[in-house]
Amino acid sequence: MSEDSKELAGAGSHGAELHLEKARIPADVFRSALERFIISWAKNMESKGALIGHVKLIAEVNGGYYKLSVVDVGLGVERNDGLVEDVVTGGRIKIMAAVLNLEDEEVERSLDEVLEGLTNDVHLHKAGHHCDHDH
Amino acid sequence: MMIICLISGFLGSGKTTLMIELGKRLGSKGRRAAIIVNEIGEVGVDGALINQYGLNSVELTEGCICCSLSGSLQNTLRVVANDYKADAVFIEPTGIALPSKINTIIRTSMVEYEAKLGICVVDAYRAEKIYEEAGLFFRRQIEDVDIVAVNKVDLVNDEKVATVEELVIGLNPKVELVRMSAKRCEGVDRIESILFEKMGARE
């Protein structure tokens, strides 16, 4: 099993977990912010020469979920909407991308470049980072 | 004894959508399905979605079960076979896994199973582009499977589907082709009936 399929495919990937605490975000605003973010990330990687494999996220918030997926920027965002409340107050969001033609580090850098927009929109923070202020 | 169903295919081809649909159908007919899902990155997204549908899943992350996580797959298969008593175990590898390597891992896992079904999901919308960019890889994903499910046929015209099918058959003439839109649950019946034939054969 010495052959590494990731290497063989020329693939790169990166994922992160984001936490949302003490928030009060209307569900529609939350949906829009996540959709803007995921398409921005896909476009950003494409602009660096990536062939998108899969860019996806799942928000598990307030007992419900919202899953988004992009496999081709031309096709846009695919949604799977299981949000159960009108206001999002807390939970976690898992995000990941796997693409061809970029290294893991390049995928991570691309995420960092677009993540600021999302964190500004819905006051998220990455797992491991704790902030004391109210969001 | 259980059957093993390997659902492979390139990133974003629709493997999870198909697997959830098959898992739900098995459940509705009183069969127990267990799911082993593998994500290439350190963060798993699909496992969380599968759990939302009330299906039983084990998520293996941070590597590919066809190479770096081959031992984890064998251990997980043993646990599922011994503890869960599933009628069918679905294995969804990463979108860059090679089915032939996973078949070898399953064969050497010391897990007893009645039958194995290998399905490769191909995205009709993107197949030619992926073949152009990663031809060798595309070919190896088509090899060593029983069925190629040409998915997302709702996004393309018949001519495009026929071109993709021709490409697939050119790479693996022995494979059975199924046209499908997993999202719309179209074409899944054929795969479901093959699964039940495999399970029925042991009764």
Image (cartoon, coloured by chain):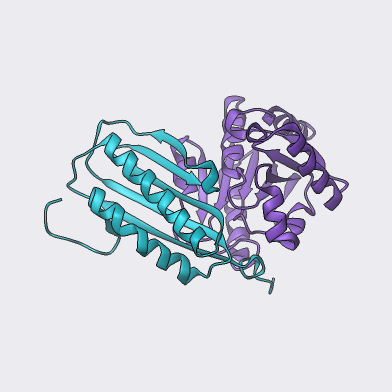
Q: Residue at x 79, y 53 (%)?
A: B144
Q: Colour of chain B?
A: purple
Residue B109 visible in the displayed image: no
Quarter location, residue A41: bottom left
Left or right of residue B91: residue B196: right
Q: Residue at x 74, y 39 (%)?
A: B160
Left or right of residue A12: residue B3: right
Q: Which chain is cyan?
A: A
Residue A2, image x, y percentages = 68, 74
Quadrant including the N terminus of chain B: top right
Q: Residue at x 61, y 38 (%)?
A: B18
Residue A110, image x, y percentages = 42, 64
Q: Nearer the viewer, residue B195 or B167?
A: B167
Left or right of residue B68: residue B144: right
Quadrant including the C terminus of chain B: top right
Task: From this view, report whether residue B179 is shown above or below residue B106.
Answer: above
Residue A92, image x, y percentages = 32, 49
Residue lying furthest top: B29
Residue A64 visible in the displayed image: yes
Residue lying furthest bottom: A2
Q: Residue at x 83, y 52 (%)?
A: B171
| Total count of labels | 0
Residue lying furthest right: B173
Residue A55, image x, y percentages = 49, 52
